[in-house]
Image (spheres, rainbow, N blue to C red):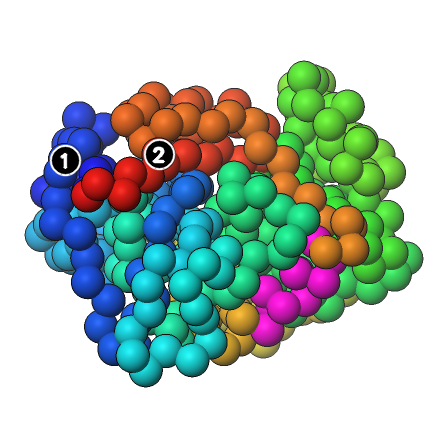
Amino acid sequence: MKAIVAAKYGSLDVLELKEVAKPIPKDNEVLVKIHAAAVTISDIMMLRGSPVITRFFTGLLRPRMAIQGSEFAGEVEAVGKDVKRFKEGDKVFGTNGSNLGCYAELVCIPEEGFLDIMPDNMSYEEAAPVCGALAAWNFLKDKANVQSGQKVLINGASGSMGTAAIQIARYFGAEVTGVCSTTNLELVKSLGADKVIDHTKEDFTKSGETYDIIFDAESKTSFSRSKGSLTQKGIYLKTFPGIAILLQMLWTSKIGSKKAKFSATGLLPVPERLIFLKDLKELIEAGILKSVIDRSYPLEQIVEAYKYVETEEEVGNIVITVGYSNNI
């Protein structure tokens, strides 16, 4: 089968399209025929092995798993003899986490892994980048307990996580302000933002407005800079780890009413994430939450897809489509 392989950490030129052996599912595994896979900044970070802390999960000196890609949507081709939740032909989506393997025509996923049946009203391309919405749900619902009437600012509102966060915050009845570039103002409004701020013309931290929740969906600012824009009991949410936010989390958990919070959604226990996914599926099936897809690339153009994500100009999600052949 065809797969995108990286034998070592490094720049995009370490990525290779190769023919590799077709995986065989173990007794507790599901063999998924991949139709689409997401491309995220996290995938690029794992490819580069940066920050170094990520190597504790992906391999210290070289990638533990050569085949790249972690988020996917596809069709069950076969199941191990002990699998009960899934059957051949099921349309499924999920993530393989640090085990990767999803930029390929086939991948094996444990039945107890992060895997579920796709909503009927989603395409494979729309279903593959589910983790952006999952993270937005984790931050807003679980970490910040967003409530009706609260004022929520989403910084990076046009990205994969931001576009989902707007829709989720609106679902809970919050007043949403989205921060994005000039070209994406109309999109952010169309997703339900009550107000929009063009970051090329205005700095929200200097506007004098305060918010109950500031969700830094693309880690473009900091708790220190945003603190003055929080209400007395406001919460600042950051999506990428760093020494500063970890220290601020510890400090604000003990002192002061304004809180800084970070969460590694992908490292949460699978049962907890599946509960989040169940809630998201209800919103998707009701037409409340929709995936925003910017561009779709064939598997062979993975380098071009990575380069586009690195420009930070993407709107919503970038996906890879996989043309599957039965003659593997």
Report the residue at 81% width, 44% height from top: 176
Q: Main secondary structure of the magenta part?
A: helix
Q: Residue 47 in the image: state x and y as whole percent.
A: 24, 41
* Residues in magenta, as a range: 275-284
User: Seen in the image, is 253 located left or right of residue 71?
Assistant: right
Report the residue at 86% width, 48% height from top: 175
Q: Which one is nearer the viewer's eye here, 80 or 59?
A: 80
Instruction: Specify the amino acid type for callout 2.
Output: Gly
Asked whether residue 214 appears in the rendered view, the answer is no
Q: Which residue is mark 1?
A: 18
Q: Are marks 2 and 1 in contact (CB under 8 Å)?
A: no
Instruction: Specify the amino acid type for callout 1.
Output: Lys
Q: Residue 80 in the image: state x and y as whole percent.
A: 29, 74
Report the residue at 16% width, 48% height from top: 66
Q: Quadrant of the C terminus?
A: top left
Q: Which mark is residue 137?
A: none
The image shows residue 200, relative to residue 180, as above or below, that is above
Q: Which mark is residue 323?
A: 2
Q: Residue 76 in the image: state x and y as whole percent.
A: 40, 59
